[in-house]
Amino acid sequence: MGASNLARGQYALIRALKKNNSSARKEFLVALGPGRGYCARGGFLNVRYSPIHDCGILSATEEKARASNLQTVALLMDIGNDIMYGFSGEEILTRLDTMIDRLNILGARIWVTPIPVDLENDVGERTFNILRNLFFPNSSITHEHARRAVSFINNELANQSPDRISLIPDLNKYCGMDKIHYHLWKSNRVWTKIAECLLADTEARVKVSKIDSGISLGYNLYQLCFRDILGIKGNAPGLF
């Protein structure tokens, strides 16, 4: 589950997961999209996605878990967009906690990426306003509001029990100039690290190449244009 970063890397990540222990049965359920929120209905240009919390992916996961003996492994990333839609850190954590509770009931292994944007040290108010107007033109959220929300969410995630969730830290060092999206030439390291975490209970060895990351970005642009913006292709199975 995620937004623009996951949308850019979806192809590369799933390809890496499928390549390892390819004989094992795997099913993927995905909720993503640029500008997507966990609490808010958000999106990009004329495209709007339902909130991840309400899109049906959790119910589908519960149904599949009850019908099979497959281990459930969940990835929650790109959790900062709701801040720009006016939700407080407390509101976002409440929604995330509800989702995590449902996944924990299934015995899921849950991996979460903290918000990678460092508003304290890397993104000043002027830069923040430029990014807000570029990516969230209808938002009036201030730098101070966003800074407090990011700090609260990341601190609360860090204080969660390791039996409840596992964090994938230090991904901010792979971010590009906008401090939001992973750098094209470094993103393969991100997806390698995430794939290793998701396969932590196996003996699989993973390496995502720069070529795979580039193909993944192209695949995302293709899906964004033809499926989301133009509506030419319907949603693929497992996509929410």
Image (tube, rainbow, N blue to C red):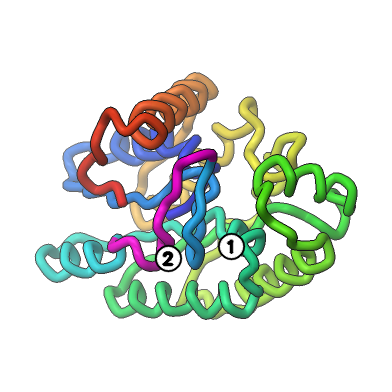
**Quadrant position of residue 133:** top right
Q: Is residue 224 left or right of residue 162?
A: left
Which secondary structure, mark 2? Answer: strand
Pinpoint residue 177: horizontal percent, then vertical percent: 76, 35
Residue 51 on the magenta span: yes
Between 21 and 67, the one lying in front of the other is 67
**Quadrant position of residue 82:** bottom right
Magenta highlight range? 45-56
Query: Disc 2 or 1, which lies upstream in sequence?
Result: 1
Pinpoint residue 162: horizontal percent, then vertical percent: 52, 75
Residue 110 - label: 2
Residue at the spot 22% in from the left edge and 62% down from the top edge: 60
Say what amino acid the circle numbered 1 marks.
Asp
- State whether residue 176 is above or below residue 65: above
Which residue is at the far left? Answer: 67
Q: Is residue 114 left or right of residue 46?
A: right
